[in-house]
Amino acid sequence: MKNPLSLITLFLLTLLAGLTAAEPTKPNIIFIYADDWGWGDLDCHGNTWLKTPNLDKLASEGTDFQQFNVLNPVCSPSRSAVMTGMYPARFSVHQHFAEPKQNHERGMPDWLDPKAPTLPRFLKQAGYRTAHFGKWHLSNAQTEGAPKPDAYGYDEASVFNGGAGWESADLHATAANAVAFIKANKTQPFFINAWIHESHTPHVPTAESMAKWKHLDEQKQVYAAVITDGDNAVGAILDALKTEGLEDNTIVMFSSDNGPESTASKRLTNKFDPDANVTGYDTFYSVGETGGMRGRKRSLFEGGVRVPFIVRWPGHTKAGVKNDSTAFTAVDLLPTLCAAAGVKLPADYLSDGESLLAAFNGEAKTRARPIFWQWLGKNAEPDYWPRLAVRDGHWKLVMTDDALRVELHDLTQDRAEDKDCSRDHPEIVARLSKMALEWKATLPTAPNPDCLSKQATSGKSSAPKPRDKGSRVTPEVRAKAFIRWDSNKDDILTLDEYKAGLKGQSDLESRHKSFDKNGDGKLTREEFVGK
């Protein structure tokens, strides 16, 4: 007769093995978010002079979603949408976080509300170790009192573009920090935001990458070098997953926060960025590409808001597939990733996105909800005038705030948005205009007062304030002022822009004239900065 204790033990072990086998393993999640990296800045997207071997490999092993949109054409609101799964305008985040005075003039808070629902918080509550490495910019480096990453659900963080007094990380340390975190947390599920600097200005390429592209002309050399640095960061993270045996159970995503920066006509090679505390090459070297789409960064046309989105999840996403049918957006990431992780969202969480997990799993999936955009920044012809936009199905309408000027585009037939169909389809224009205006009416008209820095209300600012000619102001300070006051980013400072920048000060017309060497009524960068 067999020992009954042995039989019970065997039964319990079998039962435990069955339960273990039935319980799905939570996937690790890594989101690599680039900065100003255009849709066309990938070799696998048809670029003829940039090389991105690591990203091309990622695309060959996963799915390239070719209709992915961010929800604002600049960084801070775009990143807020990823974090919360909600339109950034719901938190009054309309443009990039600047110093408090400028934020408040634009009706913005000084940081993303830490009480907002966030992806890292949901994952942490479900047992994930969470980390954020690289760019932050959910506040500003000159802003006092900004909540730190742990307030949003992160266990570990090392960032630049954070708050005043924060320790600023090295721009090139993002990948190394992510690799170290992978190694330290390989036995439990983890979530990493690896938000790289490339290809934002100032461009700070490594010497190795600059040497690799020395055969190119000056503009292309710098840009190719920073793209190579960004691609190498991706490669380092992928290599770490392979080394640790985590490839098969990790969702790796690559995207960008908006379209490519505009190219300046003149050089300012020593551009200083106070948020990142670095000096490097300026926008003269920003020669990124949209892949033929209209508009760039700061535009609601596709060149400003359609960006790369590559996903590798072995056993789920199909390898080497280009998905050109699923309209995927940044606010869909939170519900999709929580679904992939088996995380149930709170009943009171009202996402603007929807779970597109089926698309991750290679199924045909159509986004059911309309997509909305609001833009309150640069307003110029020909591609920066739209203030609102809505996409429903394959139709996209861009419009002014009052809907008196509109353009309608069929994105399945006209990816470049060259043909305005509004006159041919007045009924669609009327329907989409109504949708956009009704959506706008749901948005707050003022920021949450809990998200305002006290330094602004007290008049205190940690940012240097440029003064008139003759005072002891360095060229670097004037250069920063020029960039900030040049509202339409045309490398010219008009009298109106100068007055707006020095609002409330006296004798502004004569002071503007004193800089105007050629008497044409406009200040070039050289005239104002002095070098």
Image: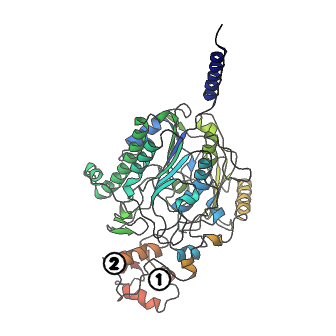
**Where residue 178 sits: x, y (%)?**
44, 48
If the image is split into quadrants, where does the N terminus sit? top right
Q: Are marks 1 and 2 in contact (CB under 8 Å)?
A: no
Say which element carries label 2: helix
**Where residue 189 sits: x, y (%)?**
54, 41
**Where residue 379 sits: x, y (%)?**
55, 69
The answer to whether 317 is drawn above or below residue 355 in the figure is: above
Report the front residue among 453 and 298: 453
Examine the image and state in which quarter residue 362 appears. top right
Residue under the point 63% across and 20% down: 9
Q: Which mark is residue 495?
A: 1
- Residue that numbered label 2 is attached to: 475
Residue 502 can be seen in this image: yes
Examine the image and state in which quarter residue 446 appears. bottom right
Type of the residue with mark 2: Pro
Report the front residue among 160 and 265: 160
Q: Which mark is residue 109?
A: none
Report the front residue among 432 and 10: 10
Say which element carries label 1: helix
Q: Earlier in the sequence, mark 1 or mark 2?
A: 2
Report the front residue among 396 and 339: 339
Report, in whole angstroms, how far the alpha carbon at label 1 lies from the one at label 2: 20 Å
Residue under the point 37% across and 55% down: 172
Residue under the point 41% across and 52% down: 174
Q: Is residue 232 left or right of residue 356?
A: left
Residue 65 can be seen in this image: no
Q: Is residue 272 left or right of residue 80?
A: left
